[in-house]
Image (tube, rainbow, N blue to C red):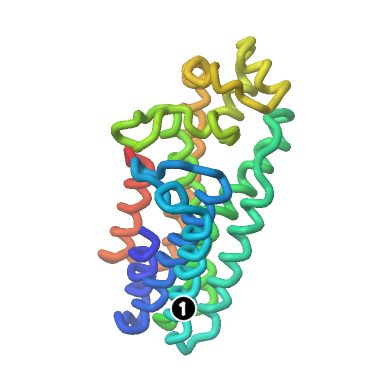
Amino acid sequence: LRAALVLLAARLGDYQFERAAHPALAIELLHAASLVHDDLVDHTLRRRGRVTVHARWDKQVALMLGDYFFAVSANELAAEPDPRIISFYAHAALTVVEGELRPVTQLEPIEIALDQYFYKIGSKTAALFEAACKSGIAVAGGTPEQIAAMGQFGYDLGLAFQIVDDVLDFTGNEQTLGKPAGNDLREGTLTLPLIYAVAQSSSPLLRELARTNSPDPASVDALVDEVIRANGVGRAMHEAQRIVQRAKSRLDLFPTSLTTRALNDICDFVLSRQV
């Protein structure tokens, strides 16, 4: 998806595949590197139903493979003469790490919980979407205004993508997600559906969780049911829909075309995806 965003953003300007291919490859390699390292740090055993690198081999292999992906990504960027592209990706890589170092640590008060949550997903997910879109339009000769607009589009799309991902953790199943529902809760990850559910429910189970901010693994299934019952999922999806509409509005700067329609279709896909 991130590579597709680079190529589509480039089609909004003077499209040259040879120029756009390098940042498209680089963003996917950067993303892959972040996933390998993220799984290692979080001790995650499976991703999308597949055994993670460190679980299949060992921590040293995972660390080196993640570093290798970073190096290959950098090598792709070295072939791009526009120094702004390297800057976009370097900033994104820094932001991803900063986001990983600042998890959501509390569920109340909701203002603080939301600030922590949106900082987290803005850093770990939206930053890469933003860099992809800015790079695509930049290599196609986009103006500073166009680059800024596409960056905002990508950032908003990334926020919505992660919110839906967090919703699927409550509504999906092991067959579709490759992991059981409530996996984030089991790992102690506090996400938007949970934040909203706690804010609008008097459930003893959710009240206890709000006090401790540490889910009891034995109560995860019951917590998933409580979050859905308290409309935490519904409210989170409403927020994702609002952000997607904002993302679509960023495209108003560009003439309507097959490319803008494709970008709008991606926005709709992000809201409707099941995995």
- Quarter location, residue 116: top right
Is residue 27 positioned above or below 202 on the image?
below
- Foreground pick, 49 / 258: 49
Q: Is residue 146 visible?
A: no
Residue at point 65%, 44% (across, down): 103
Q: Which residue is drawn at 61% across and 13% down?
A: 205
As drawn, the residue found furthest toward the bottom would be 81
- Please give left or right for residue 206 compared with residue 3 in the image: right
User: Which residue position holds label 1?
Assistant: 138
The amino acid type of the residue labelled 1 equals: Ala
Image quadrant containing the N terminus: bottom left
Dot 1, crowdedness within 10 Å: few (<14), some or many (≥20)? many
Answer whether residue 228 is visible to the viewer in this image.
yes
**Left/right of residue 270 with respect to residue 70 in the rendered view:** left
Instruction: Please tell me which residue lies in front, 57 or 190.
Output: 57
Q: Position of residue 101 (x, y in %)?
A: 67, 51
- Residue 220 place in picture, x, y as percent: 52, 21
Q: Residue visible at 30% across and 80% down?
A: 17
Q: Is residue 115 above or below residue 128?
A: above
Where does the image place residue 8, in percent across and percent down from the top left?
33, 68
> Which element type, helix, strand or loop, lies under badge 1?
helix
- At x 54%, y 77%, the residue is 144
Residue 174 screen position, x and y as percent: 34, 31
Where, quadrant-wise, is the C terminus in this rendering?
A: top left
